[in-house]
Amino acid sequence: MKQIKRILVSLALFAAFFGAVSATKAAPAQAASVTTKRNKVVKLAKKQVGKRYVYGATGPYSFDCSGLTQYVFKKAIKKSITRTTYTQVKKGKTVKVSTAKLKKGDLLFWGSKSSPYHVGIYVGGGKYVHAATPSQGVRKQRLSRYFWPSTAKRVI
């Protein structure tokens, strides 16, 4: 009987030790996975620069602002986000609009927080990619205090 107890205790300690080790390895792996996803989103967003703006377009040859964000997230990381700016702002976690707080892949919104009129993707370094206007198309721009986003959402 004592032999069985020793074996069971040994097995329990073994399982607890290796379970804890694998759990501590999972957190960095998840963080790396999130970083990889953010980088994929940014890479694909930048590839769209220069394409035409067409109201209602969802890619791959032309976009409107929310069509661009929807396309990039779906193609880069297989993440479905809704079609319109108005519904996209309801997704994810709200993030303070500050270059110190923003992370690559965050969605930036302009207009009221509950009913924005424009969306873009933060690509790091104080810049974002968006489908701007019919005359400008998809472009990468620096955040400007004259055109500062009203809110940001983290969906990755």
Image (spheres, helix red, strand yellow):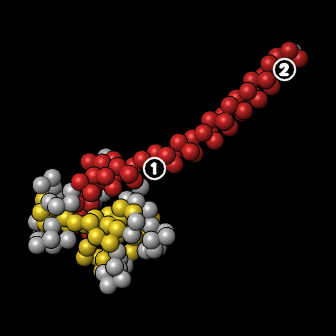
Above/below status of 155 relative to 101? above
Q: Nearer the viewer, residue 57 or 41?
A: 41
- Residue under the point 30% across and 48% down: 76
Q: Amino acid at mark 2?
A: Arg
- Residue under the point 53% across and 42% down: 29
Most distant residue in the right direction: 2
Question: Spatial distance from mark 2 to mark 1, Cα to Cα?
Answer: 42 Å
Q: Position of residue 16 (x, y in %)?
A: 72, 33
- Residue under the point 38% across and 51% down: 39
| Residue 140 in the figure: left or right of residue 3 | left
Q: Give the residue at mark 1.
A: 34
Mark drawn on residue 6? 2
Q: Where the N terminus falls, by quadrant?
A: top right
Q: Position of residue 15 (x, y in %)?
A: 70, 29
Q: Position of residue 64 (x, y in %)?
A: 17, 65
Q: Residues within 10 Å of mark 1 (few under 14, many from 20)?
A: few
Q: Position of residue 3 (x, y in %)?
A: 86, 15
- Would you identify the image quadrant in which residue 42 lies? bottom left
Above/below status of 44 relative to 21? below
Above/below status of 90 relative to 148? above
Q: Nearer the viewer, residue 118 or 99?
A: 99
Q: Secondary structure at mark 2?
A: helix
Answer yes or no: is residue 91 visible: no
- Would you identify the image quadrant in which residue 83 lies? bottom left
| Residue 50 in the figure: left or right of residue 145 | left
- Residue under the point 46% across and 45% down: 33
Q: Amino acid at mark 1?
A: Val
